[in-house]
Amino acid sequence: MHAATPIVLFVLSSLASGIRAQDPPASNPLDDDGEPMKLYAVQCSPCHGERGRGDGPAGRFLDPAPRDFTKDQFRLVSTKNGKPSDKDLIEAISAGIPGTAMLPFAHLGPQKVRQLIDVVRAFQRKGLRETLAPHAADEKELEEWVRHDSTPGGTIFPSPAPPDTVDSRARGRLHYQTLCAQCHGPDGRGTIMPRLPDSKDPPVKARDITQGVMKGGIEGKNFFHRIRCGMPGTPMPSVMKGVLGDDGVWDIVHYLNALMPAGAQALHSPQGWRIFVPKIEGELPTQAADERFQKAQAVHIALAPFRADEYTIRGVAVQAVHDGVHVIFRIQYADATSDVPSKQHRLPPDGFAVRVTKYRQPPVLPIPGLPLPLDRAIWLAGAMPPGEDPVFDHVKPRFVNPDRVCISPIGPEHVGSGKFRDRTWTLVMPVKPERAGAIVSGETMGVSFSVFDGSLRRGPLPVSFSTWQTLVFE
């Protein structure tokens, strides 16, 4: 739980030099007693499921849905046959997939990222065996087929990028209108992609390029690979050299760069930061204007969406101070509407949740049946309506919570105060770590955030959430 950008670079550089052939490891990564599977169970199974089928308890709430590794459809690839290289998987796990609920996991370190790659590949091979077994003559032929179908082809290396000029962007616009506009729209704002002929999955929403948040990153080579290699499992096709040469692909890349606002990817890509928490004296601050908050630097925390179409709250500004017993957060975030339930305003309330823990490398989302030593505090702009209230079912898919993944915020967890002005919520939230452990000067504690937007009528389901940040106590 440190500043993520240098860790991402460290993980990529450490692992890239060790890319190896895709032979199965000597031990079975799917062994429940093995370290790789234990790591996967804590960090990945809440979304991707115990057996990698994308059916984890939190998965039902997410859009895009978590990847089913057994289907052998990996979106972000750089190879000739559409099978991910180790480098592709390293980048997806370490850097996350911006614009989705897939957060970066570079903080786990190179060794654990490698273990997760072994588990993902084991799920991939298991799915291929189940699909191919009825057609193979014997076990030997089956294993040959699995090995062939799970081995990535050669990496497609982009040619050197030509200069990004007005002429290049003009040519790129023409290529874009011919090859891309049908799905992404003539203005790049995204339409609904056509459904694959043999797919039972719902239609895929094309990326709105003008938002500047791209799943595979915005570096030139990433754009190049998305165009040249396509995105397997979606209607996004590969553009072969016979259709458009490398210079033509680079022209499209230059045009796409012109459509994107500068800095948007960095602003909206969730990362883990270190937040310095100064110590204060006296009574707990109750007002956001308390001058003692000036000792704390405001940190922008980007949030990830639970559902892409409901990505209404994308980030928050956080300041934190402590008095040796409480951590007191001052939080600001933009919201188009103030949702405070009343007889005239029949919606769930706006709200904000904070979790703190000293547990090392905690899971991003809760795991049913796995209690963690953490403390949670929730602020609500009014009372949450009853669970049977129709507002919970107003937007499909209707809110269901059979595993109590989300628990209605009640009781002593409801803390803090908030004021809404100029389409901005400003909150003051004190948190008293008890289960997590006492505050100790010079030590650290993890913290994560999530936001509720009453306008979406999701009840106790947050709209967006952060990865774990690190509080450093003075």
Image (tube, grey):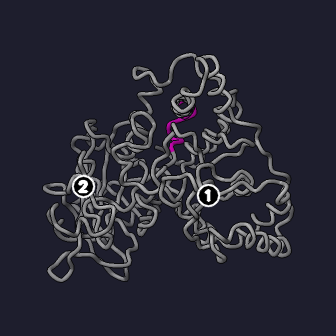
Work out whether residue 290 can be spotted: no
**Gap in Å between the C-alphas at discs 1 and 2?**
42 Å
Categorize mark 2 by other alpha carbons within 10 Å: few (<14), some (14-19), many (20+): many
Q: Based on the displayed image, in which of its 4 quarters is residue 9 positioned?
A: top right
- The residue beneath circle 2 is 377
Categorize mark 1 by other alpha carbons within 10 Å: few (<14), some (14-19), many (20+): some
**Closer to the camera in the image, 287 or 238:** 238
Does the magenta segment cover residue 300? Answer: no
**Closer to the camera in the image, 434 or 80:** 80
Q: Which structural element holds mark 2?
A: strand
Q: Amino acid at mark 2?
A: Ala
Q: Which structural element holds mark 1?
A: loop
Q: Position of residue 345 (x, y in %)?
A: 21, 80
Q: Amino acid at mark 1?
A: Pro
Most common secondary structure along the magenta stretch: helix
Marking on residue 199: none
Left or right: 344 in relation to 394 = left
Query: Is the Cβ of the residue at disc 1 closer than 8 Å to that at disc 2?
Result: no
Marking on residue 235: 1
**Badge 1 or badge 2: first in the primary sequence:** 1
Q: Nearer the viewer, mark 1 or mark 2?
A: 1
Q: Position of residue 57 (x, y in %)?
A: 33, 44
> As displayed, is residue 151 above or below residue 184?
above
Residue at the image point whose x is 58% and y is 56% from the top = 196
Work out whether residue 170 can be spotted: yes
Q: Which residues are magenta?
A: 105-114
Q: Position of residue 351 (x, y in %)?
A: 28, 65
